[in-house]
Image (cartoon, rainbow, N blue to C red):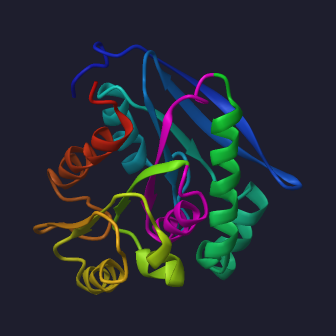
Amino acid sequence: MEKDTEHRSEEQAVRIPAGAIELEGNLGVVEGAQGVVLFAHGSGSGRSSPRNLYVARVLRQAGLSTLLIDLLTAEEEALDLRTRQLRFDIGLLAERLVGATSWLRDDPGTQNMRIGYFGASTGAGAALVAAAERPDEVSAVVSRGGRPDLAGEALSRVEAPTLLIVGGSDVPVIGMNEEALGRMYVEKRLEIIPGATHLFEEVGALEEVARLAAWFRRYLVSRD
């Protein structure tokens, strides 16, 4: 693994207001960064997901700041583990992403950065709904093994360039991504990683995800 020597970064625990509750997160601000990527987890995952931690580290090495948050509180997560309902409450998850986006706009360390969303599983659907709600603030979206189809009618309103990444062996999800792609009218691309399953646990699969996530640099970094 390449050490983070080119771009100095500082990580800190943060609490983000979301209505009557607060969400816990980890903010990694890279010195001189022009963009920040907000991670939207789904399906029982959170800010401690080793897969998203890896991708976030690669993005910081590439000069982008990152914010990983838990979209559910500990109590909600415990309820969701029993019912599996909240992870599919796309409206709730999107609302919290919009709140985190406002927080990034208000935070002195990130307020001038372009914002991108990295969504995984059901978090991808929420990211696209939130992107449709904040077209002037969200500059790019990347989905990993996501359910963009869950964004429903919001897909046609997304203005941010969107990259969908799916494992080649994740057959049902490939179809869901193809269906969602057909309902979007922005710059868009579907990348299928041969041999990868839903969690991208195969050798080299997650590294390929991180490489493709360089999509963010196109839209979050100035070409001046």
Q: Position of residue 135 (x, y in %)?
A: 53, 58
Q: Position of residue 65 (x, y in %)?
A: 46, 30
**Residue situated furthest left in the rendering:** 194
Q: Point out the stretch of residues depicted in magenta.
A: 109-136
Quadrant location of the C terminus in the rendered image: top left
| Residue depicted at 56% across the width and 28% down the height | 112
- Residue 19 lies, with reference to residue 89, above or below; the image says above
- Residue 204 lies, with reference to residue 9, above or below; the image says below
- Residue 130 lies, with reference to residue 91, above or below; the image says above
Name the side, left or right, on which 188 lies relative to 47.
Answer: left
Q: How many marks?
A: 0
| Residue depicted at 30% across the width and 83% down the height | 182
Quadrant location of the N terminus in the rendered image: top left
Name the side, left or right, on which 158 lies relative to 202.
Answer: right
Q: Is residue 94 magenta?
A: no
| Residue depicted at 34% across the width and 67% down the height | 186
* Viewer-side residue, 51 vs 111: 111
* Viewer-side residue, 7 vs 201: 7
| Residue depicted at 63% across the width and 37% down the height | 104
**Residue situated furthest right in the rendering:** 20
Q: Position of residue 170 (x, y in %)?
A: 25, 77
- Residue 108 lies, with reference to residue 23, above or below; the image says above
Q: Is residue 117 magenta?
A: yes
